[in-house]
Amino acid sequence: MEIIIKRETDSFYTFLSFMIMVAAVVLLVLLYNFAGYIVFVPTPFILFAAGIVSRLVYINYNKVEFEYSLHSGIFNIDKLVNQAKRQPVIKLPASDILTFGRYNDSVDEEYKDGTKHVDCSSGRDDVDLYYFTCHQNQGRFLIIFEPNEKLLAMLKGYSSVVAKALLKDNK
């Protein structure tokens, strides 16, 4: 089973992309004031480089999706950038989940002891977020994600920790 969650567009990174282009133009104006007409020789290169950096910032932070998949008890989360570049976030047997539950602000306080927090959600406020913790080679992780009911039911079948947390949550 696979689910794709699209991350909401963050206006900060859109603004940052715009400001990179503005900074390039301001740099060109300052160079013109100091160097004169000779500055028009590198102008296309400076604008091209600023355009590339601006586009990379925009794509890497605004065109992000997460794919959750569960096959044969292996739970996998991948980050998809611009629907082309796949970056694995985590891959583990569902039985290796240490803790599981609904996500709220108190969870951050509980796991601030060196646990790496990874947000694999859409970033919207109107969805039910869940979290789980696990150990990987790089240390302890707290993964925040937004599964649908079908994925929760499947996870429950592979992990007793998830089953207990969902049973407790329904009471």
Image (cartoon, rainbow, N blue to C red):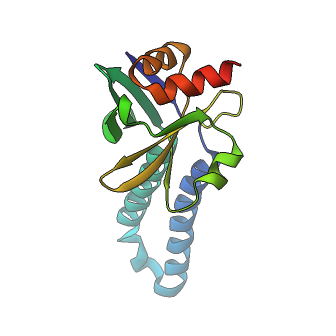
Q: At which x and y percent is residue 125?
A: 70, 34
Q: Which residue occupies the foreground of this view, 84 or 3? A: 3
Q: Is residue 102 visible?
A: yes
Q: At which x and y percent is residue 55?
A: 44, 49
For image coordinates 44% across by 60% down, the residue present is: 50
- Work out whether 22 lies above or below 153: below
Q: Is residue 81 visible?
A: no
Residue furthest to the bottom? 34
Q: At which x and y percent is residue 100?
A: 54, 35
Q: Which residue occupies the foreground of this view, 80 or 117? A: 117
Quarter holding the C terminus is top right
Quarter holding the N terminus is top left
Instruction: Classify residue 51 as left or right of residue 23.
Output: left
Q: Quadrant of residue 112?
A: bottom right
- Work out whether 136 lies above or below 77: below
Instruction: Classify residue 32 as left or right of residue 44.
Output: right
For image coordinates 47% across by 52% down, the residue present is: 57
For image coordinates 58% across by 54% down, the residue present is: 111
Instruction: Classify residue 47 as left or right of residue 88.
Output: right
Q: At which x and y percent is residue 68?
A: 41, 27
For image coordinates 69% across by 40% down, the residue present is: 104
Q: Quadrant of residue 128?
A: top right
Q: Which residue occupies the foreground of this view, 19 or 142? A: 142
Q: How many marks?
A: 0
Q: Quadrant of residue 82?
A: top left
